[in-house]
Amino acid sequence: MAESYTYLRNALHRAHPKLAEHQAKNARKRGIAVRLRALRDARGLTQDEVAAAAGMTQSMIARLEALTGPVPSLQSIERYVDACGGHLALLISDKEIDSEDAFGDAFAKARGRIPADIDLGIEDCRPPHNSQTKA
């Protein structure tokens, strides 16, 4: 299945180079949107519930979850994630990060393929409730 999808995508990109350019521009936005939606779904929340908890409107939440459009601000993403009770990590590296590795395919489940030599520097956005801090 994945091979046929890749073949079809490559054929479309050869036939329509502007489509490939457009899709590349939206790859980061798609990755963010898919993860936000997956977090909301995992928590069993509606867009209205997330909007109320984040102090945003439902239409703002819909724009954050849209697969196309401008990449949202870090502050907006943070408010959304906090409203869902999730955790946010920012990956900054001096090594090239393949967007498929970092964001995954928008049409497939996240595969968690981050090389072991990349330091994620993950910090929880909320204080731990009942756990000890590891050094």
Image (cartoon, helix red, strand yellow):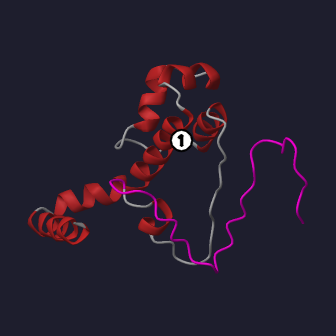
- Whether residue 117 appears in magenta in the rendering, the answer is yes
Residue 31 percent coordinates (x, y): 44, 53
Residue indicated by mark 1: 39
Q: Which residue is drawn at 49% across and 24% down?
A: 46
Quarter of the figure that contains the C terminus: bottom right
Q: Residue at x 50, y 19 (%)?
A: 48
- Whether residue 19 appears in magenta in the rendering, the answer is no
Q: Residue at x 53, y 41 (%)?
A: 39
Q: Nearer the viewer, residue 46 or 53?
A: 46
Give the number of callouts.
1
Magenta stretch, main secondary structure, is loop
Quarter of the figure that contains the N terminus: bottom left
Q: Which residue is drawn at 32% across and 60% down?
A: 24
Q: Which of 2 and 26 is in front in this view?
A: 2
Q: Which of 85 and 29 is in front in this view?
A: 85
- Amino acid on which disc 1 is placed: Leu
Is residue 96 placed above or below 107 in the rendered structure? below
Residue 40 percent coordinates (x, y): 52, 35
**Furthest-bottom residue in view?**
117
Name the quadrant containing residue 117. Answer: bottom right
The stretch in magenta equals 106-135
Residue 135 located left or right of residue 65: right
Residue 34 percent coordinates (x, y): 43, 46
Residue 60 located left or right of residue 135: left
SS class, disc 1? helix
Residue 45 percent coordinates (x, y): 53, 27
